[in-house]
């Protein structure tokens, strides 16, 4: 009998190393740590692309970004698709067809105008990338409870690289009690749906899939003093990759450092910003705890799977960068992956997996098959503690731009990572010798064999997927010998 109910929890721009269950000795994350303690913690869990809309669309459709076509965020769209194409299989539909309640609360960011209501889900479209602090529903909620409206003091800005003034807003002190925050509001909305779903489960046996998506800890970190000052900056180690020089790397990385004015902040300022980011993580964890407590209070703990993940990570000063962008480092591509299923063993797994795999996994939990178009595979056997069937030896990801078009592909195996940058120098990192990815050894003679092997493997995987990025590699890269395929469809006729 499959587990019937699913509580799906998701954050935005969440670093793995902020969670106690992933080894942070300072940050307090008891709720998420409890999910890890009773379930599976994936240590090699990746986003298919480190940007919100394409990553979330990959989870929703079960497809690689180049296939579903939502390649960038709508706010920075340079001509890519804005909405999931009609007729594309999406995660909600088979669950609805099977009689499930399907609820979505919080960040959507899959399309520009179509929200969860368009897909017949319970929930309201909160559009955009950042906390919707002026959304009418939120403001009514504040008014009904007598809470103060959104206000911030002591904002922290970077500096504009072109000398025109202040740059991006990074942090600030939110002048609202914790109970009035967007994070608490989203938890409240989720609890309202859960109350109704629990009643129907107990009276009718009707199952549910309920998702709560927080907009944080995405910057800017606008949180109450209680969390803003929770962690002593003296307890915060600076990322080792702040020693980044960008030597031998694509120049776009240095330009992104300028764009985010990372060097505007000295060591003390960065320690405080990271401490505030940690406080934001703890604030969200406390809201997670409210939802887990409600599951137990409703008598649903033994009937409900709990999944937690994020759409991608964040730099937060690593590599002298901030936010995310055209740099395929572990900081933004490796993400948390926690799944707790009643009756399954507590374990830590190092199997390569991605957000795309959660699409068929959720359907499998509900006893439903994945659509033929799905690019992922169910993790349910792994979650049951079984040896993985056909263990992946690598993970391949893609990037299509943010602020401007910029194409990248990455292949990572157990030791090495190759980043393919068609317009610039390629990158190769030895993650065992250089875990902070500071030294690009792509042109080092000692790594010639590794470079050749990974290039050929990346090419073959892109070719297998039908990712058009392989066409450039066909004539421009060491693809392992032999003639390039007939990518234009006419070469054989004129040979």
Image (cartoon, rainbow, N blue to C red):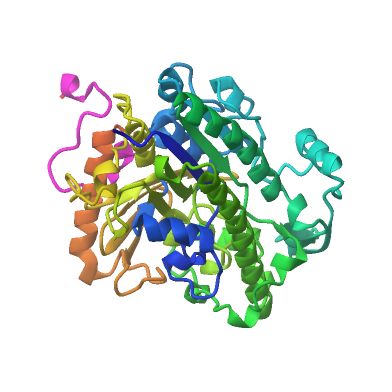
Q: Quadrant of residue 269?
A: bottom right
- The residue at 53%/42% (across/down) is 298
Is residue 415 shown in magenta?
Answer: no
Q: Which region is colored magenta?
A: 468-494
Look at the image and say whether residue 478 sits in the magenta stretch.
Answer: yes
| Residue 97 percent across, percent down from the top left | 42, 18
Question: Nearest the camera: 282 or 434?
Answer: 282
The quarter in which the N terminus is drawn is top left
Residue 356 placement: quadrant:
top left
Residue 48, percent across and down? Answer: 40, 44
Look at 20% across and 49% down and name the residue there: 386
Q: Residue furthest left?
A: 482
Q: Position of residue 343 (x, y in %)?
A: 31, 48
Q: How many marks?
A: 0
Q: Tell me what residue is drawn at x 55 percent, y 31 percent.
A: 199
Quarter location, residue 471: top left
Visible in this render: residue 77? no
Q: Residue furthest bottom?
A: 234
Q: Quadrant of the C terminus?
A: top left
The residue lying at 29 percent from left, 71 percent from top is: 432
* Whether residue 229 is situated above or below residue 141 in the rendered picture: below
- In this rendered view, identify the residue nearer to me: 70 or 218: 218
Residue 369 seen = yes
Residue 47: image x %, image y %? 42, 48
């Amino acid at each position: 009998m499959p587990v019937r109910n699913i509580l799906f929890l998701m954050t935005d721009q969440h670093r793995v190393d902020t969670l106690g269950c992933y080894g942070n000795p300072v940050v307090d994350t008891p709720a998420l740590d409890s999910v890890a303690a009773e379930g599976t913690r994936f240590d090699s869990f990746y986003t298919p692309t480190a940007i919100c809309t394409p990553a979330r669309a990959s989870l929703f459709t079960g497809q690689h970004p180049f296939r579903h076509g939502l390649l960038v965020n709508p706010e920075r769209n340079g001509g890519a698709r804005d909405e999931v194409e009609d007729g594309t299989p999406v995660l909600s539909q088979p669950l609805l067809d099977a009689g499930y309640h399907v609820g979505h609360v919080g960040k959507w960011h899959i399309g520009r105008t179509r929200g969860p209501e368009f897909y017949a889900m319970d929930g309201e479209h909160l559009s955009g990338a950042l906390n919707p602090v002026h959304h009418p529903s939120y403001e009514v909620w504040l008014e009904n409870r007598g809470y103060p409206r959104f206000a911030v003091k002591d904002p922290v800005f970077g500096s504009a690289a072109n000398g025109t003034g202040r740059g991006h807003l990074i942090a600030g002190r939110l002048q609202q009690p914790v109970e009035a925050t967007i994070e608490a509001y989203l938890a409240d909305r989720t609890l309202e749906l859960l109350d109704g779903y629990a009643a129907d489960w107990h009276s009718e046996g009707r199952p549910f899939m309920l998702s709560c998506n927080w907009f944080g800890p995405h910057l800017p970190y606008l949180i109450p003093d209680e969390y803003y000052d929770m962690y002593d900056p003296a307890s915060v180690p600076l990322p080792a990759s702040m020693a980044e020089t960008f030597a031998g790397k694509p120049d776009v990385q240095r330009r992104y450092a300028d764009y985010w004015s990372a060097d505007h902040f000295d060591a003390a300022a960065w320690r405080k910003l990271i401490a505030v980011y940690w406080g934001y993580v703890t604030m969200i964890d406390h809201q997670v705890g409210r939802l887990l407590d409600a599951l137990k209070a409703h008598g649903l703990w033994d009937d409900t799977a709990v999944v937690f993940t994020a759409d991608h990570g964040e730099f937060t000063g690593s590599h002298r960068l901030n936010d995310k962008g055209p740099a395929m480092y572990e900081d933004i591509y490796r993400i948390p992956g926690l799944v707790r299923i009643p009756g399954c063993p507590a374990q830590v797994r190092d199997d390569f997996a991605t957000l795309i795999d959660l699409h068929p996994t959720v359907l499998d939990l509900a006893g439903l098959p994945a659509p033929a178009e799905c690019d992922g595979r169910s993790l349910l056997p792994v979650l049951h503690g079984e040896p993985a069937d056909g263990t992946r030896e690598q993970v391949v990801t893609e990037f299509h731009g943010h602020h401007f078009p910029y194409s990248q592909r990455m292949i990572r195996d157990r030791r090495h990572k190759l980043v393919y940058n068609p317009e610039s120098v390629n990158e190769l990192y030895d993650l065992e010798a250089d875990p902070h990815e500071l030294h690009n050894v792509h042109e080092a003679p000692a790594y010639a064999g590794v470079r050749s092997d990974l290039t050929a493997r990346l090419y073959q995987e892109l070719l297998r997927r039908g990712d058009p990025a392989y066409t450039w590699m066909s004539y421009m890269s060491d693809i392992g010998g032999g003639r390039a395929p007939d990518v234009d469809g006419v070469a054989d006729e004129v040979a």
